Image (spheres, grey):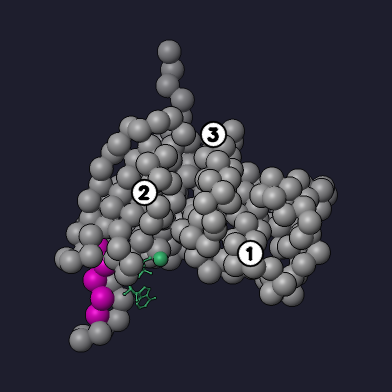
Amino acid sequence: MLSQPVSRIHLDNVSQSFGKNDNQVHLFSDLTLSIEQGRSYAITGPSGSGKSSLLMLMSGLEVPSKGSCYYINDETTSPLQSLRNHIGFIFQQFHLLPELTALNNVALPLKLRGQKDAINRAKEWLKKVGLSHRLHHTPKQLSGGEQQRVAIARALVFEPNFIFADEPTGNLDTKNASDVADTLFDCCKENGAGLIVVTHSDELAARAQHNFSLKNAANQFISSTSEISPC
Ligand SMILES: Nc1ncnc2c1ncn2[C@@H]1O[C@H](COP(=O)(O)OP(=O)(O)O)[C@@H](O)[C@H]1O
Ligand SMILES: [Mg+2]
């Protein structure tokens, strides 16, 4: 039987540091890892250990100070930036557009892709995250948890190949956190997307098939592959 082509993101001997001289911050050195589409990954570690920075590198939104990041589809290798239109990113600070309603924030990625049913699909996604009653509110009229759910709907609405989520349940109560986790993992399963979640929640991390943990002290990187449950 022929194996399915594997689509993956590969970080090759990557190091990341910021600043100069006395102000220099080293986050990680010579890190090599792969993320496959269709699988789920958790990144854990203390505050300031570099989780968000690692997510930015994996998604191609930032470049490393050393090393290379690629997108490999079957046998074709391209720059990670070529994946830009196929990634959904849920930022820790949401980054919703303040002048747009929840509905228009979620419809925007579809409109930018020229999709005619953008508004209806955005409504469906806002319903999935429990926000049908907040379609016409702007971000500042929404609570932190509601904004987070809008950001999640916006990242998933165009069915990306890879979903990056930076502490996606950080502002949510237990019930909403559990619903949002279900939405993320269901989306990964239904669309065969790769899911990479930064989290402080042991419960959320335990749902991922693989775990990467960052240590604070020497900022060492530990990768453990735990086949806990299928995505
Ligand atoms: N663009 C940047 N310039 C300078 N320092 C940065 C930058 N991005 C992150 N850092 C520093 O890198 C460290 C790790 O940040 P971050 O990746 O946000 O950690 P975490 O998400 O684990 O809390 C922090 O000390 C932060 O101040
Ligand atoms: Mg962070």
- Give the alpha-carbon distance from disc 2 to disc 3, as whole Å: 21 Å
Magenta region: which residues? 24-29
57 vs 167, nearest the viewer:
167
- Give the residue drawn at x 48%, y 42%: 194
- Give the residue drawn at x 25%, y 85%: 23
Tag 3 residue: 189
Task: Answer whether labels 2 and 3 touch (C-beta < 8 Å).
Answer: no
Tell me the amino acid under the disc marked 1: Gln
- Check the image and name the residue furthest to the front: 174
User: Upstream in the sequence, badge 2 or badge 3?
Assistant: 3
Tag 1 residue: 147
Is 155 situated above or below 41?
below
- Magenta residue check for 121: no
Label the magenta part by its dominant secondary structure.
strand
47 vs 89, nearest the viewer:
47
Disc nearest the viewer among 3 and 1: 1
User: Upstream in the sequence, badge 3 or badge 1?
Assistant: 1
Find numbered disc 2 in the image and state the secondary structure of the residue it sits on.
helix
